[in-house]
Amino acid sequence: MTNTDTVPAVATLAQQALAPKQVEPGNIYLVANATGDVRTIDLTGSEYTGELARKTGTTTVRDAASFLTYYAKHHDDATEVYSDVERLTITAVLDAHQAHVARFGDHRLVLGLRRTKAWEEWVKLDGQLIDQERFANFLEDHLVNLVDPDAATMLEIAQSIKASTRADFQSSTRLQSGERKFAYTEDVKASAGSKGEFAIPETFRIAVQPFEGADAYSMTARFKYRLGGGSLALGYKLEQPEERAKAAFTDVLKAIAEGVDTPILNGTPA
């Protein structure tokens, strides 16, 4: 066979090597091309099979019940759970490393507690002194959170405060009951200089949910005031609100601990 005869024969073999052949997703193929190189075609990927090779991603939930539902569906014997009280988060690494087998650790479940609007509003005004009308309106808008004195009594106090916004305050006296009495003289043009007074309790109690889906927690608030130039500024100081938030987080953590089958680690996963 001459060289002239050899070229078509080689070309025919090359064409046969490159001829299309039916392949099946889920397999790996080695394919030779005309230059003699071998190329690997991997059809095991999800883009060919339509199936994910493994679970990945982070799911964030907002309450303990949702956390336990997702955890029950996806955890295995090697799943790890971490709590971080400073960040108010609980994280489950659903595909954590096994004792003798390394895994990816990138399928995660996070409980990210979200503070309620009411909690944020009470904390925002904590320690501030504001004008009478704003303070009275705040009490009226948050009657649902007032526990002791009850909402009806606090509404009367709010209305008394609001009714005296244009008065000239003369003095404040602490009563034996623990209440604080404020004496004032009303605007002369409006009521011929008539005198009035109202009393507010030294402390009151509120009950507020720190987080969405959590129980309400009780806190004591101490009334604060400032008299100056005939005007009155009012406010309150909450009793350790952040400690109450951490206590609420601890209760959520206990609820989750009862529903998972692994010890909860104190910290943050890598």
Image (cartoon, rainbow, N blue to C red):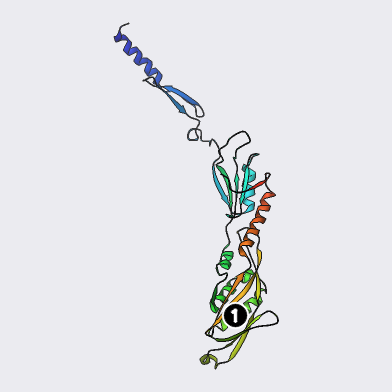
> In the shown orientation, is residue 9 left or right of residue 117?
left
Find numbered disc 1 in the image and state the secondary structure of the residue it sits on: helix
254 is higher (above) or lower (below) than 4: below
Query: For residue 85, which quarter of the picture?
Result: bottom right
181 is higher (above) or lower (below) than 147: below
Q: x, y (%) of residue 58? A: 55, 46
Q: Residue furthest left?
A: 4
Q: Which residue is mark 1?
A: 159
Query: For residue 102, which quarter of the picture?
Result: top right
Nearer-the-camera pick, 229 or 111: 229
> In the shown orientation, is residue 33 left or right of residue 201?
left
Q: x, y (%) of residue 2? A: 30, 6
Amino acid type for the residue under numbered disc 1: Gln
Instruction: Give the crowd class for mark 1: few <14, some 14-19, many >=20 residues within 10 Å.
Output: some
Q: Residue at x 59, y 80 (%)?
A: 159
Q: State whether residue 220 appears in this view.
A: yes
Q: x, y (%) of residue 106? A: 55, 42
45 is higher (above) or lower (below) than 192: above
Q: Residue furthest top?
A: 1
Q: x, y (%) of residue 75? A: 63, 42
Q: State whether residue 214 appears in this view.
A: no
Q: Residue at x 64, y 52 (%)?
A: 65
Q: What quarter of the picture does the C terminus occupy?
A: top right
Query: For residue 142, which quarter of the picture?
Result: bottom right
Q: Residue at x 60, y 76 (%)?
A: 224
98 is higher (above) or lower (below) than 219: above
